[in-house]
């Protein structure tokens, strides 16, 4: 076994129920972009689909993969859909994001006419995250343009928050107020046309910390996988949510060796043995999702003990100090992420050791590493 990622579908469904109940009466949409944050796109989507109002992806390719995998839930495509991919998006019955009122709308309506079907869209407003979206003062004019085309149905209007993980976040309130003002200006037009769009702006952190942002629907991402949006979020939630980690990552030692005091280990000789010691070789490295920044900083679990990483993480190998696991031998299990006896190594640990966030850790786990799905 070079390496296996295990996914608990029971934990995934548990988290989906917890989040659905948290945001009620708002609807729960579950974000499965980025290979379901590294957990496996189709399998994760199928597990939570019965609890979802929508499933959110980034690209049309993901929507097509979900449909091919048997997913029937509404799909919201959060990222840009190139005009040439619009026929595929409509074939997948996907709901694209729309923030352009010119040539793109022509391409959208032509694709819809060619399929003899309307297209449901979610209109995105920029509330000073300053990535994608209409400026708030452009919303009314844009809606009037969209509604000139019977092929376009306004399914939702949404935005995205920049700082919802922060406990004291005036910027979150600024964004929500900007969103509300834009909706208020558009309300007369929408009411005249009998349109009641789904309003959504909150993701996991906002749903936990800022209940007023839940509106009609919440896009739950990182929390679905049993990971917290930030340590501050976890500390601030008054009634801790019982989120369960979904992913574990395991391998085994392929070799052990004894080295004398002073021996160097790995590329560049960044570690020298402070005493005679036993070390183990784990057949995974930065090509397999282990951040190189874990070099001489991180640790894996072997035999119920925490074994520090020594030397530089290489492309496909990582070395560990086996001093705390004297009985370890080739074939002994190595827990990279997960529980081993009384020792737990988490994606949050990896993130802390490599100065990043848990989102990056799990989404960068390569798809070529086999996933096994446990119910």
Image: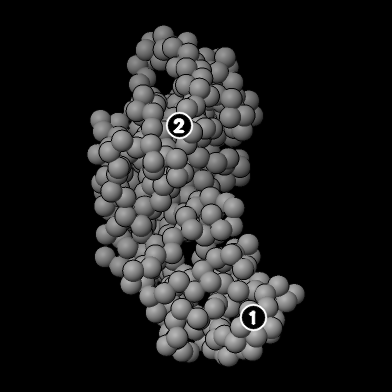
Image location of residue 42, percent across then percent down: 40, 58
Looking at the image, is mark 2 or mark 1 nearer the viewer?
1
Q: Which residue occupies 27% across, 45% down?
A: 18
Which of the image's four quarters has the C terminus?
bottom left
Q: Earlier in the sequence, mark 2 or mark 1?
A: 2
Mark 2 nearby-residue class (10 Å; few <14, some 14–19, many ≥20): some
Q: Position of residue 157 (x, y in %)?
A: 45, 26
**Tag 1: Cα neighbours inside 10 Å, few (<14), some, or many (≥20)?**
some
Q: Is any atom of residue 115 visible in this view?
A: no
Contact, mark 2 vs mark 1 (Cβ under 8 Å): no
- Residue indicated by mark 2: 167
Asked which secondary structure carries label 2, the reply is: loop
Across and down, in percent, residue 258 comes to 58, 90
Circle 1 — which element? loop
Disc assigned to residue 273? 1
Please report the residue visible at 38 percent of the width from the left and 10 percent of the height from the top: 192
């Amino acid at each position: 076994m070079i390496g296996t990622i295990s996914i608990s579908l029971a934990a995934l469904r548990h988290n989906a129920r917890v989040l659905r109940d948290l945001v009620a009466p708002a609807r729960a949409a579950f974000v499965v972009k980025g290979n379901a944050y590294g957990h496996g796109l189709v399998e994760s989507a199928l597990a939570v689909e019965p609890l979802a109002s929508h499933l959110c992806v980034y690209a049309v390719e993901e929507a097509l993969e979900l449909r091919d995998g048997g997913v029937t839930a509404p799909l919201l495509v959060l990222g840009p859909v190139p005009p040439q991919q619009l026929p595929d998006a409509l074939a997948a019955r996907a709901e694209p994001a729309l923030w352009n009122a010119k040539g793109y709308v022509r391409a959208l309506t032509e694709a819809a006419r060619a399929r003899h079907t309307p297209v449901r869209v979610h209109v995105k407003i920029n509330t000073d995250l300053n990535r994608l979206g209409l400026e708030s003062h452009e919303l009314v004019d844009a809606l009037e343009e969209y509604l000139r085309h019977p092929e376009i149905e306004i399914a939702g209007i949404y935005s995205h928050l920049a700082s919802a993980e922060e406990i004291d976040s005036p910027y979150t309130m600024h964004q929500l107020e900007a969103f509300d003002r834009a909706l208020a200006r558009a309300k007369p037009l929408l009411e005249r046309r009998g349109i009641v769009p789904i309003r959504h702006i909150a993701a996991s952190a906002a749903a936990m910390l800022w209940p007023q942002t839940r509106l009609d629907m919440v896009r739950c991402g990182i929390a679905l996988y049993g990971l917290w949006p930030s340590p501050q979020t976890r500390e601030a939630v008054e009634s801790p949510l019982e989120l369960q980690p979904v992913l574990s990552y395991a391998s085994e030692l392929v070799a052990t060796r004894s080295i004398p005091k002073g021996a160097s280990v790995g590329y560049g000789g960044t570690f020298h043995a402070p005493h005679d010691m036993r070390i183990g070789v784990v057949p995974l490295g930065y090509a397999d999702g282990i951040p190189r920044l874990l070099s001489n900083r991180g640790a894996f679990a072997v035999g119920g003990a925490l074994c520090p990483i020594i030397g530089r993480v290489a492309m496909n190998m990582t070395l560990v100090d086996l001093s705390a696991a004297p009985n370890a031998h080739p074939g002994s299990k190595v827990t990279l992420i997960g529980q081993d006896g009384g020792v737990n190594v988490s994606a949050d640990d990896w993130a802390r050791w490599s100065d990043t966030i848990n989102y990056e850790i799990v989404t960068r786990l390569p798809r070529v590493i086999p996933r096994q799905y446990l119910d």
